[in-house]
Every structure is written in C-alpha cells, then in structure tokens.
Amino acid sequence: MDAPEIPHGILVLPYSRHSELNSTKVQNAIVLYKSGLSTKQVGTRLGIPKTSVRSILLKAKVPLRPSLWTTEGKATRQKRSMAGNPPYGYAYLDGRLHIHPTEIQVVRRILNLRHSGMSFSSIACNLNDLEIKTRSGKTWDHSVISEVCRRNLPTDP
C-alpha cells in the first residue's frame, strides 16, 4: 500500500506530547521559570506537567537550577539555626533567635518570683491566678516553669 499523498505546502510533524503547546505557553514557561518559580509551580500555572516544563526549558537551552535534593541544591538552601519552636520568651526572625517582647516580661516575672524563693508549683499557680496563659493558650505547669528557669538562670537559689 502506498502512503497517502500530502498536498504541497502542508508540513506534517511527528506526534509529540507537546503538540498542544503553543508558542505563548512556551514563552510563558520560560519567563515564569526565569522569574524564580519552580518547574512544578510553572506547570501548575500553565496547566501542564512539570516534566513538560522541564522539556521546554531544556529545548530552549535555559539553564536549570539544581534540585534541592542534589548536593548542589542542598548548599543553596537557607540554613535555620534551630528546628522546632523557640524557647518561651524568644522568637525566630530571619532564621535567628530574638527576644519576644511580650513573652520576655513573663519570663522576667518567673525569674523574679523564683529568685524570691517561690517553688515552681507556686509560680505556676501565681501565673494561672493572674490568667497569664502559655504560648499555646494553656495553663502553666511546674515543669514548664522549671524549664524556663533552667534556660534563663545560671543556678537555682
């Protein structure tokens, strides 16, 4: 069987997964990626898979940023000084530990009460009577008071 004759002037391209992509989407993908978005974010905005975005970028000879899971990518990640929640009386700002302006007043009260000779349990009761809540909105417990004192006092009285 002979192949069907193709009329003059019609270009037949082999099927491609990207055949539905128009030049506007390709240009948008390049611009979005160069603006700092990840291939996944670009794909989500344009409604195409991230692997298609990657193929578009490679064909356009756009240099790809290293993945965060590679050795090169791990080096570019921002490092945090500590993981988890900061100690009571402190807060993280730009990855660094700073004094929390309202919580530090409670810490000072705890330290003053401890210095005056009160026990951890009596300090907890005092704060609960004044309706001063912990960061999570709970009542104070002697173990929490103990930790605050341990972190902020060189030695117990």
Image (spheres, rainbow, N blue to C red):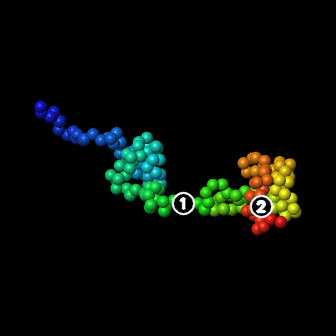
Q: Residue 40 placed where, x, y %?
A: 45, 47
Give, as a three-letter code, the residue at label 1.
Gln
Crowdedness of circle 1 by 10 Å Cα count: few (<14), some, many (20+)? few
Residue lying furthest left: 1
Q: CA distance from mark 1 to mark 2?
A: 32 Å
Q: Residue 125 placed where, x, y %?
A: 84, 51
Say which element carries label 2.
helix
Say which element carries label 1.
loop
**Quarter where residue 24 is shown:** top left
- Mark identifier at residue 78: 1
Residue depicted at 34% across the width and 39% down the height: 20
State the residue position of label 2.
149
- 45 vs 58, left or right, is right
Q: Quadrant of the N terminus?
A: top left
Residue depicted at 72% across the width and 57% down the height: 88
**Quarter where residue 102 is shown:** bottom right
Q: Quadrant of the C terminus?
A: bottom right
- Mark identifier at residue 92: none
Question: Would you say residue 20 is visible in this rendering?
Answer: yes
- 89 vs 82, left or right, is right
Residue depicted at 81% across the width and 50% down the height: 132
Looking at marks 1 and 2 on the same chain, the residue that comes earlier in the sequence is marked by: 1
User: Which residue occupies the foreground of this view, 30 or 133?
Assistant: 133
Q: Residue 126 placed where, x, y %?
A: 86, 52
- 1 vs 40, left or right, is left
Question: Would you say residue 105 is visible in this rendering?
Answer: no
Give, as a three-letter code, the residue at label 2.
Cys
**Quarter where residue 52 is shown:** top left
- 146 vs 34, left or right, is right
